[in-house]
Each structure stands twice: as structure tokens, then as C-alpha cells.
Amino acid sequence: MNFIETRGNDSKHPLTVTFSHAILNPIASYGGLYTPEHLPKPGVEFLRRHINSNYKTLARDLLQAFAIDIDTRVIDEALSLYDHFDDASNPVPVVKVYDDLYVSELYHGPTRAFKDMALQPFGVVLSSLAQQRNENYLIMVATSGDTGPAALETFKNKENVRVACLYPDGGTSDVQRLQMVTEDAANLKVIGIHGDFDDAQSALKRLLGSETFKQKLKQKNIHLSAANSVNFGRIIFQIIYHIHSYLELVRQQAITLGEKVYLNVPSGNFGNALGGYYAMKMGLPVEKILIASNKNNILTKLIKTGAYDLRNQSVIPTTSPAMDILISSNIERILFDMFGAARTKDLMQQLEKNRHYQLSPAELEKIQAVFAADYCENDEGKAYIKRAFATGYLMDPHTATCFKTYETCRTLPLKTIVYSTAEWTKFSPVIANALTGEIDARDIDALKSVSQVAKIKIPAIINDLFDKNIAQKAVINKDNIETEILAFL
Ligand SMILES: *Cc1c(COP(=O)(O)O)cnc(C)c1O
């Protein structure tokens, strides 16, 4: 399978590239993204054959349908990391919470958030490519709190790979910060910046596009790449669990094969939702994809009105910080898929120049045929957490945003798969507040009180963080990022 560019070709980049090229050099012509030239169409027959497949078998066969240029041995090694999830035989449990609301739990990996679903296997694929080619890579990561820990975990001590991870200081939970700053390996550098996630992501994009930075790295014999969800190497692993979750509903006899469902996704950079979109295009019976946001509701406005408007907008901190995003990068791949490269380039350039674009009525109609959206206020989210807990289900504040879209965006009484993107342990102060009314607790105290109220143990991987040595101390201004990274290298 080959990959093409969302903003067309500038004749300096190759016209089409392989999967390995696309993941090692993720920035395409005009700052666009790589995207598959064609999607495989496995269809209902593929689903039927996999009704009783375990996660790894499903994943292996699906990746095979993509015909990517990665050795089977490497893919098998990558997928074997799902064996380290809580339940090796079922890394993604799907749990019935209300009558037609099922929660697909994507957080059972080592860093307790759904980023592990893609980054665990991606780390193996990328470092094997680097080793095969005998090349060294600097992987840049900008994180709002979950990508960072997952990327550090997957690349820790891997050959031929170094990681520079940027996070907004004060913009993450204590647990998320500790997961990053306690990572002590010679190939990892963690940098807190004074600013929000969009500042971190913009700094990353600037460095990835900077010829002078690339030249400086070249002198040190290092190539530059990125592990953000714009990298297709992550997206490909995010298609699998949508199909798995659907098949789980069939296995649980909640639906019959072929019956349509809603996918309900707490969205930020739109990687998770994009995986669902591709799964739908590949033949998964999906009625619509419901896009849940928090008060940073740029996606709700886009899907309701066709306007992407960043003017006079700034990121509002919420109780679901992994979704505190205004620049949702993977929307670009949807634009490309629906409207083509010329229009995508035009829209993205309008956004960069005027901080605004408006889709035509016909374009909006196409978007609304696939997506519906709404956003959830902090207090509403807390109420959903409390209500679900009363029926015996403990969920995190990101997952809770989907309970709003579940109520407001469905027009048919179909089964709905809500994606749970983090374990409660990563955002315990919000949950303690929802369940006990406790305010402004630090993570360490909130973990204890939720653990008591819910009668569940704090997982050791989380508890141990508080006693670990802080290995990564840098917190700097965004203008000094390049210097800090060069000093590390
Ligand atoms: C990253 C993240 C999201 C947003 O996912 P996208 O793929 O960026 O839309 C939602 N919830 C949690 C907990 C996350 O870590």
C-alpha cells in the first residue's frame, strides 16, 4: 500500500511513499500529512471470519490487508506487547453500562491511557526500522498528558531512537507529570514548557518543518521524526480496536453481525475518531461517529456549522485535559478524504493565515452524514461520573464527555460504543470531587479517597510513582526548546 499527501505534492517530495517512509518522515508537502492511497475493503465477510478471533489475530489480519512494508516478524513482535495488558487474552474489554451503552476500555496498557493502544506497537515498528536502516532518529512528542508517558514508555532504552517530549507545565495531572519526569533513561529527554498544549504542538510542528534544525541534527547524524497522532504509524493501530469492539458486541449477543452501531469518541487531536472513520469506510456497520468534546468545543462547532474558527479563541483548562485542544490535526485527513487535496490545502492555508475557514453547505452535509457532535461541561461530566458510579461503573472524565453525546446526538435507538480513554487513576482529583465533593485534592490524596469509596486498590504502577526520583527537571520558555534539545543530543 502506498501513501499520498493531504495537501498535494510540491514536486520536492516523492509522489507516493511507502508506509515506512510515511512513519519515519511524517511531514508531507506544504506541511500536509500522509494518508493511504486506497483503504482495503475487508467488508462483512472479514468480520464474519473474525467473530471468534482474539485481538492479536484480528490485528495481524487487518494489518495484512493494508499490505504495509513491515516484516511479519516485526509486526508479530509489535502486537505481542498487547500480552502485557491487564488481560493478555482480551486487552480491550467491552463492558455493558446502560441498556444500549457499551464502554470499550482502551486503557489497560502500561500507562493507563488509550495512547498505549497505538504507541506500544508503534515503538517496536519504528525502532526496528531505524535499526534495519542503521539510522538514528530523534522522535519529537508534544503531549497534553497521555501521549508523553506512552511514548517514553515505548521508546525507553530502544536502540537508534531518542525522544524529546514537550509537555505544558501545569497542564497535566500529577500522575501524568510523574509518569514523564520519573522516566530515567539516557535516550529520553522530557521538557516542561511555560504554555498550553497548543504551544507545545506548535513548537513541535515548527521544529519538524525547520530546515536549519534538520541540518543541525544531520551534523550529529540524526534524523527527525514525530510520534504524535498525525503519524500514520499510530492511526493504523487505532483502526483495529473499533473493529474489535464491534465484534465484541456481536459475541456478547448485543447485536447481530451487520447491525449498525454508533461509535462515540472523546476527541482531541481526532486520531481515535479517524480510526473509527477508516473502520467505517472499510465496511464496519456504523450509523454515525459521535464526537464528544469538552468546553474547547471547536469540533462541535465545525460539525454543527462547518466553521473552523480559531479567532479570539484560547484553550480553556477543563477536567478532561487530554481534550483541551483547539488545533485538531487529524481533521485534515477527513477533509482530504471527503474534498480532495486541492481543497484541503486551500482550507488549511486559510486556517493558518486567517485562523478560520468555512465549509460550503454541500461540504457540511457530507461531514454531517458521518459525524454528529456535542460538548460536555465540567459539571455535566461530574454528574455523569456520579450516575454511572451509582450503577457500579467507575469512569474517568474524558469518557464521561461521551455520555453527553450519547444523550443528545443519537437519532436512532442503536447500540452505542463509548470509548474509555483513561483509567480513573490518571484523573483522580476530578473523580474524588464527583463522588465525595472533595475539592482541589492532590492526586495522592484523591487516589486514596476514590480507592476507599469505590473499594478498589490503587494499581502499584500508579502508587509507586510518588516515591520515584525526579530524573527530568527541565521547565523552560518555548523559545528555548531548540537549544535545550540540541544540548541533550
Ligand atoms: C489523547 C486522549 C484523548 C483524545 O484522543 P484523540 O485521538 O487525540 O482525539 C481523549 N482522552 C484521553 C484520556 C486521551 O489521552
Image (spheres, grey):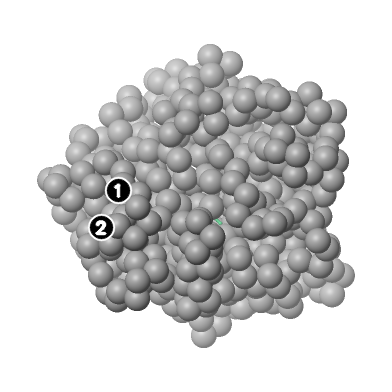
- Tag 1–tag 2 contact (CB < 8 Å): yes
* Residue that badge 1 annotates: 458
Numbered badge on residue 448: 2
Rendering coords of residue 136 (x, y %): 36, 29
Label 2: few (<14), some (14–19) or many (≥20) C-alpha neighbours in 10 Å: some
Res 26 quadrant in image = top right
- Left or right: 477 with respect to 151? left
Q: Quadrant of residue 370?
A: bottom right
Q: Of 464 and 326, which appears nearest the observer?
A: 464
Q: Toward the viewer: 281 or 460?
A: 460
In the shown orientation, is residue 147 left or right of residue 41?
left
Label whose residue precedes the other's in the sequence (1 or 2) = 2
Give amino acid for label 1: Ile
- Of 318 and 234, nearer the camera is 318
Report if residue 409 is visible in the image. yes
SS of the residue at dot 1?
A: loop
Q: Is residue 171 positioned above or below 269 on the image?
A: below
